[in-house]
Amino acid sequence: MNMTLRSLLTLFAASGLLFTACQKKQKSAVTGRGYNDPKWGGFYNPKYKGQETGPGLVLIEGGSFTMGSTEQDMTADNNSVERKVTVNSFYMDETEVSNLHYREYLYWVMRVFSEYPEVYRNALPDTLCWRSKLAYNEPFVEYYFRHPAYKDYPVVGVNWVQASDFAAWRTDRVNEMILDREGIVKFDVMSDGNNDNNFNTRSYLAGQFNFAKKGKHLPRDYTKKKGVRERVSTEDGILLPDYRLPTEAEWEYAAQANIGNTVANNIDVKKIYPWNDYTVRVKDGKERDRGKIVMNAMVGKGDLGGIAGGQLNDAGFVPTPVYSYWPNDYGLYNMAGNVAEWVMDVYRPLSLEDMDQFMPFRGNVYKTVQLNQYGEIEDKDSLGRLRFRNVELQENINRRNYKVADNIGFKDEPGANANDDYFYEYGATTLVDNKARVFKGASWFDRLYWASPGTRRYLDEKQSLSTLGFRCAMVRVGAPVGNSKKKYNGLPSSGIDKKTKRKR
C-alpha cells in the first residue's frame, strides 16, 4: 500500500471517528437516558452560551459594598446609615433614557392603541413640570421634549409609574426583535399588533399569542421523531428577562463603581463621588481637560453653567445630552449629575436598618397569573397582557418566607398589618406612604451634595420633576462574570473545569 492511499484511509478513519463523536448524544448523569432523544421521551437539554446583552445595557459585575451616605447628613434625616450589603450581577443602561427613546415609545403606543387614546395620554410626560412661578421657562415647556435640538437629552417629567410602563414596553419590543431576528416568528408590525394583539412576552410564553407568522427556525420538538415546537420557552434561554427600574442598592452600587479600586479583594479608596477624587474638576489626564467640571450640577449658588466668553464650568444650564462628560469605571454616564433618577424602591427613613443583606429592596407585592374556574389562564386584558392578581393568604399557609402579598410595609411597626399606612400618619406628620418612591443622584439644578451615591430622596410615584429622569436595568442570570472565559477560585464562569472536574 503506497503512502498516498494509506494517508487517505487514515484521513477517512479520522473523519469517521470525528463524525461519530459529533453525533454522540448527551446522556443524563442520573439515569443514563439520552437528552434531546425522542426514544427517551424527548427531555430537552439546550445548548446555552450565556445571556445576551440587551440593547443599551452594560454588565455590572455584582459584589459586596458599603451602602449609605459617605457625606455628612446635611438634611438631618438620618435616612442613609452605612451598611454592608451584596448585589447580584445585573445590567444597567449606559445612559439615561433620552427624549428620542421616549418618543419612540409614545409613537408605538399611539399607533398600536389607536382605539384607546387614554393609553397614549397616560404615557405623555408632564412638560408643564418646567414651569416655576418666578422664572420664565416657557421655551422648555414647549420645546424640550419634542424639538430635535433636545432629542439626545434625558427625558424628564416622567413619573415612576410611567417609567415602569416604559420598561415593560421595552421588554416586549426587544424580545419581539429577538424572535424575528432568529427566524422564529416573522412580525409585520404595520399590519399586525393592534390593540390587544400586540406582542407581549408573558402572553407569548403562556401560549396566548398566535397572530404572527411562523418563521423558518422554530425550535426542534424532541418529543416527536420529526417536527418543531409552536414557540420557544423559558428553557430555551432565547428571550431576555424583564427590563425594569434598578433597585436602590443596584443603582448605588453601579454609581460607586468600586471595580476600579479593588486590590486583593479589598477596596483601597473610599469614594465620595463616582470618581476617584474629592473634587468635581479634572486634575489629571490631558492638559486640555484639566480644570473642567466632570458633571452637570449647580456648582455654586446661582451658577448653573459658568461664565460666558471663556471656558464654561459644565456648559449645562439645563440637562445635557446623555453621553456628556466622562463615564465611571463601569462605563456608565451621568451617574452623579444631569438628572436625578427613579429607582424601584418604596421609601422608608430606616430602609438601611431593615433591609436584607443580599439584594436589598423594599416594595415587594407578590402576584400570580389570574386563572378561571377551570384552572386555565383567563383572556388577556385590553392591552394584550396577562391578568395578574395578588397572592392570597390561604395560598401561603405553609410558607415560612412570606404570608401576604403586599410586603411594602413589612417591619414598619411590630404587629402592624403589611397593608396599613397608619404608622406614618400620612398627611399629618409625614409624606411617606406606600406610594413614596426613592430617587437617587444629583440633577442639573442640585448642589454637589446630592452627587454622592449614598444620598437619597423620595417623591410620590404619580408626580414628576424637570430634574428627574430614569434608566433601566435587567437581572444577570447565570454566571456573574458574564459570558467570558474569566475564572474565579480556579473555576470557569460556567460549566465544569476540565482538569479538576469540579463543578462551577
Image: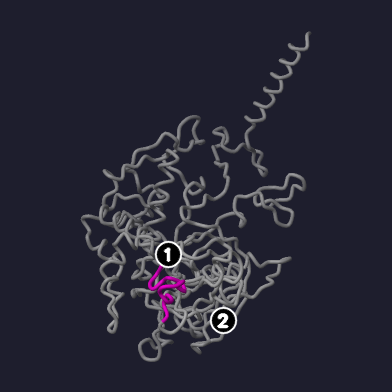
Q: Is residue 307 above or below residue 89?
A: below
Could you tell me which residue is drawn at 72 percent across and 15 percent down? 9
Under mark 1, the amino acid is Lys
Report the residue at 50% width, 36% height from top. 223
Res. 70 image quadrant: bottom right
Q: Locate residue 5, reporting x and y percent.
A: 73, 11
Query: How dense is the environment of label 1, judged by Cα within 10 Å: few (below 14), some, or many (20 and up)?
Result: some
Amino acid at pointer 2: Glu
Figure check: 125 above or below 418: above
Secondary structure, mark 2, is: helix
Q: Main secondary structure of the magenta part?
A: loop
Q: Where does residue 461 sit, x and y in percent of width and height? A: 37, 74
Give the residue pinned by disc 2: 353
Is residue 259 toward the left or the right of residue 407 in the image? right
Q: CA distance from mark 2 to mark 1?
A: 26 Å
| Drawn side of residue 25 relative to residue 385, left or right | right
Q: Position of residue 163 (x, y in %)?
A: 38, 66
Instruction: Tell me the crowding category of disc 2: few under 14, some 14 to 19, or many 20 or more residues within 10 angstroms, Cα based.
Output: few
Residue range highlighted in magenta: 303-322
Mark linked to residue 367: 1
| Mark 2 vs 1, N-terminal side | 2
Which residue is nearer to you in this view: 133 or 171?
133
Label 1: which secondary element: strand
